[in-house]
Amino acid sequence: MTWLVWRQHRNQTYLAAAALAAFAVLVLITGRQMASQYHSALTSCAASHTCGNLANTLILGTPVLSLLVTLTVVVPCLLGVFWGGPLVAREFETGTSQFAWMQSITRSRWLAVKVGWALLAAAAWGGAVSALVTWWSSPVNALNHQNFQPGQFDIQGIVPVGYALFAVALGIAAGTLLRRTLPALAVTIGVFTFLRLVIGQDLRSHYLTAVTTPFSFLHAPPSPKGSYWLVSGGVVGPAGQVANSHAHGGPGVSFGGVPVPIDNMPSACRVLVFQSPLKFGSCLAAHGYRGFITYQPASRYWAFQGIETGIFVLLAAALIAVTAIAVTRRDA
């Protein structure tokens, strides 16, 4: 059965291996250049004590290469579309599944071998691409503290492996239930994209309770160490948190990245907004107003990676269970 699976999917495997090899060569060559450039700049700025401005003066990589690395975010979805979607659906369309079952191969074994190899290949390819991207991005991460940024969090670490397993499992389940390849591909793309957006934008920031740090307007907002994730910021007055009128179309100003709603500030302070920003901050402090930032510390990065990977692995397991029930209990 394993030999049959290899014969059926060897062309896909060869193509994916060639694409991965070409990507690896490009990443390894440019990654070494970027690392050398970063360490040279770090040595130079350390001697002149100007490393605090390094992120504003040093540009690593080219826009085209950075775009290519960013586009690896679609790799898990492509695996789901081209490996997962047709895996069972095409067997039903062509009737080859019935031929296999008549050769003393049970449905359970047929499914286990096909799904097992598909998931193993998805994990290997997703992990390989992620490992290359993570290594290549190391100097950029150190320079810009960008690990938690959505476009970077999703293509580095271990989460791409979870995405790949989920995408392939989703494609297999869709193909099994619909028994048509093209509808299965459409469902895979739509559901995968929707869940990724919902989890990334709405759920990710709530995996662990964020840290809230207050600060006085007499000083700049605190800057946590490393690649922290700034979730939100605002103003607390004598009566409690102040609503952000800027979010509803009202005027506002930014105090070190923290939005300050002008309309909800004391009238004595509002006139100072554009006349003297320093006096504006002093006025707010004198009236009992403080700012706050809510963030996820850099130390939680791998915890977030593990939580999100676990979510998608569990979803993949549920989809494979649905697939197994559909194959073993429904008439072919």
Image (tube, grey):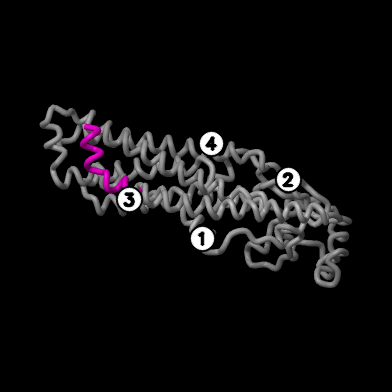
The span picked out in magenta is 1-16
* Magenta residue check for 7: yes
Label 4 crowd (10 A; few <14 / some 14-19 / many >=20): some
Image-based side of 225 in relation to 175, left or right: right
Whether residue 230 appears in this view of the structure is no
Marks 4,3: beta carbons within 8 A: no
- Residue for badge 4: 306
The N terminus appears in which quarter of the rendering? top left
Label 2 crowd (10 A; few <14 / some 14-19 / many >=20): few
Q: CA distance from mark 4 to mark 3?
A: 30 Å
- Residue for badge 2: 225
Residue drawn at 55 percent across, 64 percent down = 63
Secondary structure at badge 1 equals helix
**Residue type marked 4:** Gly
Which mark is on residue 67? 1
Secondary structure at badge 4 equals helix
Residue drawn at 84 percent across, 54 percent down = 219
Whether residue 229 appears in this view of the structure is yes
Q: Nearer the viewer, mark 2 or mark 3?
A: 3
Q: From the top left corner, tell me how far across and down residue 323 is, in percent.
A: 28, 36
Q: From the top left corner, tell me how far across and down residue 171 is, in percent.
A: 32, 45
